[in-house]
Image (cartoon, rainbow, N blue to C red):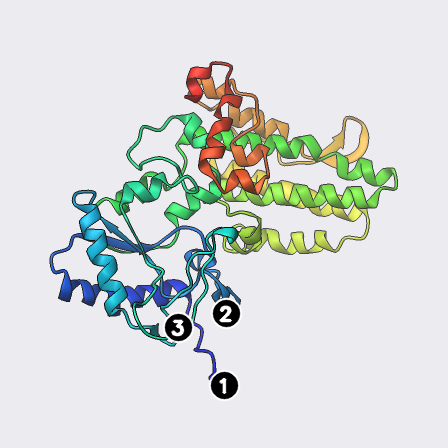
Amino acid sequence: MSMPPAFIPGLTLNRRFYLEVVRPLLDRHLPGLIHSAGLMGYGSDVLGYDTPMSTDHNWGPRLQLFLSPHNYAEQAEALDALLRTHLPPTFEGYSVHFSQPNLADNGTQVVEPYTGGPVNHPLSILTVDEYFSWSQLLARTPDAPLTAWDWLAFPEQKLLEVTAGEVFHDGLGTLGSARERFSYYPDDVWKVKLAAQWQRIAEEEAFVGRTGDLGDEIGSWIISARLTRDLMRLSFLYARRYAPYSKWLGTAFAHLPIATDLLPTMQALSTASNWHEREAQLTCLYRRLATEHNTLGITEPLSIEVRNFFGRPYQVLFAGRFAEAVNATISDPSLRNLARIGAVDQFTDTVAIHSNSRIAAKLKSIYSNDKSIAE
């Protein structure tokens, strides 16, 4: 039985696959073909979090090849035929021959033994507009006009999928600029999300003690976990980085500069045996995020001290102060006057919504009674 090949991170593998295999084929057989190439979208390899376990599906020598919309059909057909005929069946020990997409399992593909004939490669051939318009990505062309309501309806995971990964070649000159356009939120939208995130914390910060005081340690533990997650997502906002969905949230959080300060406290919080210990660790986290807020100078400095919750013996930051202060700096009155619910992935945690931007966009009507805004 042959040994599996040495693991190579997907981005490294596919950068080499393009430079050493795909690009030479194009130069030799389709000289002058203007194209762009990269690895983006969904997948642990795109984020750089892949491990040997990741190789069991949708992983291997794969990338996107982007063509000009002019003569696309003809060029795509010729390119696909070239790849099927001339790609090697393996690269660095990894199969380039994949199964057909399993439509019953979200199009999952797995490697298959190559027995001859055309190589069933997993490379995508498409246009930049087609890629961004895919409903499970952003459901719009990259140059389409964007309103604040559009930005609020984009799940962060989807924005991460179009901006993470790597562009290996941009002969079209449009792929890099398209990604740059979505690199991060406009300032006012960012502040809407900041204010909403502080508001989420304000709504539950007293409940860790209140539930514990009733002897409900399980309830207190659940609320402290929710608050920890909210503080993690707040950290992404202050770092101006998109947060991934739950599977990768902790991994990505550990790469934030502020994580060095927060992780030891979060570890202690995760093993706290009673609500008093949980509250003590949470107040440390509140103070550190409040300090980060003041350091960035978004608003006038706010007190970072915790205090009793309206005379009750529960220590809170009164996080609503931060929500109100951030909200007051929003320049667009229509955004400043919104209910403080934030973006789509702040008020719903349903994967079915986060995984399909067309579905998420239907929630734009939540932001206003003026239905024209959601058109």
Q: Residue at x 41, y 31 (%)?
A: 187
Q: Residue at x 46, y 23 (%)?
A: 330
- Farthest-out residue, top: 370
Give the side of residue 36 with respect to residue 10, left or right. Answer: left
- Farthest-out residue, left: 32
Which quarter of the figure is the C terminus placed in? Answer: top left
Return the disc, 3 or 2, that comes first in the chain's sequence: 2
Q: Residue type at mark 2?
A: Pro
Residue assigned mark 1: 1
On the image, the x and y values in percent for residue 188 come to 43, 28
| Mark 2 secondary-structure assignment | helix
Residue assigned mark 3: 94
Residue assigned mark 2: 52
On the image, the x and y values in percent for residue 343 come to 51, 32
Q: How busy is the neighbourhood of tag 3: few (under 14 within 10 Å), some, or many (20 plus)?
A: some
On the image, the x and y values in percent for residue 38 come to 31, 55
Q: Label 1 to label 3, Cα distance in Å?
A: 16 Å
On the image, the x and y values in percent for residue 73 come to 21, 47
Return the disc, 2 or 1, that comes first in the chain's sequence: 1
| Mark 1 secondary-structure assignment | loop
In this view, the mark in front (1 or 3): 1
* Disc assigned to residue 154: none
Closer-to-camera residue (18/166): 18
Q: How many numbered dots are placed on residues in this image?
A: 3
Closer-to-camera residue (155/320): 155
For the question of whether residue 299 can be seen, the reply is: no
Q: Residue at x 77, y 26 (%)?
A: 310
| Mark 3 secondary-structure assignment | strand
Return the disc, 1 or 3, that comes first in the chain's sequence: 1
Give the side of residue 81 with respect to residue 241, left or right. Answer: left
Q: Residue at x 46, y 16 (%)?
A: 371
Q: Indicate whether 171 appears above or below 7.
A: above
